[in-house]
Image (cartoon, rainbow, N blue to C red):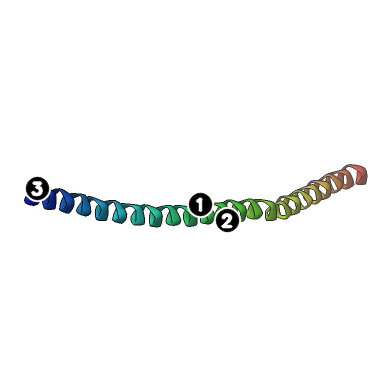
Amino acid sequence: MEELLSKLYGDSHENALHIAILNREGGEMRDEQKKMSVALDELKITSAKSNVNLDWLLKFFWIIATASVGSLVAAVLGLILKK
């Protein structure tokens, strides 16, 4: 009878240790998941900022394109009116 109780207690003790290890590792995994989530949020913010920062390039392109087209129109009108 004592052998049965010791085996039963030993198994439950091993199970308790196993559960404690799983809980600890699960907690570590949750911590890592939180860190990854924060890193992904920072990456999203950085990506959004870089999209906003590229707006000046688009405006600059349109200014240059408009000036180029304007100068071409002025040159053509100058040639037409010269005759």
Marks 1 and 3, Cα distance to the nearest angstrom? 48 Å
Q: Earlier in the sequence, mark 1 or mark 2?
A: 1
Seen from the viewer's position, the closer of residues 53 and 41 is 41
Residue 56 horizontal side relative to residue 82, left or right: left
- Numbered-mark total: 3
Q: Earlier in the sequence, mark 1 or mark 3?
A: 3
x then y, percent, for residue 41: 56, 52
Q: Amino acid at mark 1?
A: Ser
Residue holding disc 3: 4
Q: Amino acid at mark 2?
A: Glu
Q: Earlier in the sequence, mark 3 or mark 2?
A: 3
x then y, percent, for residue 46: 60, 56
Whether label 1 touches label 3, CB < 8 Å: no
Residue 2 horizontal side relative to residue 46, left or right: left
Which numbered mark, 3 or 2, is in the foreground of this view? Answer: 3
Name the residue rendered at 69%, 56% in the picture. Answer: 53
Residue holding disc 1: 37
x then y, percent, for residue 39: 52, 56
Seen from the viewer's position, the closer of residues 56 and 77 is 56
Seen from the viewer's position, the closer of residues 61 and 11 is 11
Marks 3 and 2, Cα distance to the nearest angstrom? 56 Å
Residue 30 horizontal side relative to residue 59, left or right: left
Seen from the viewer's position, the closer of residues 82 and 70 is 70
Q: Which mark is residue 42?
A: 2
SS state under label 2: helix
SS state under label 1: helix
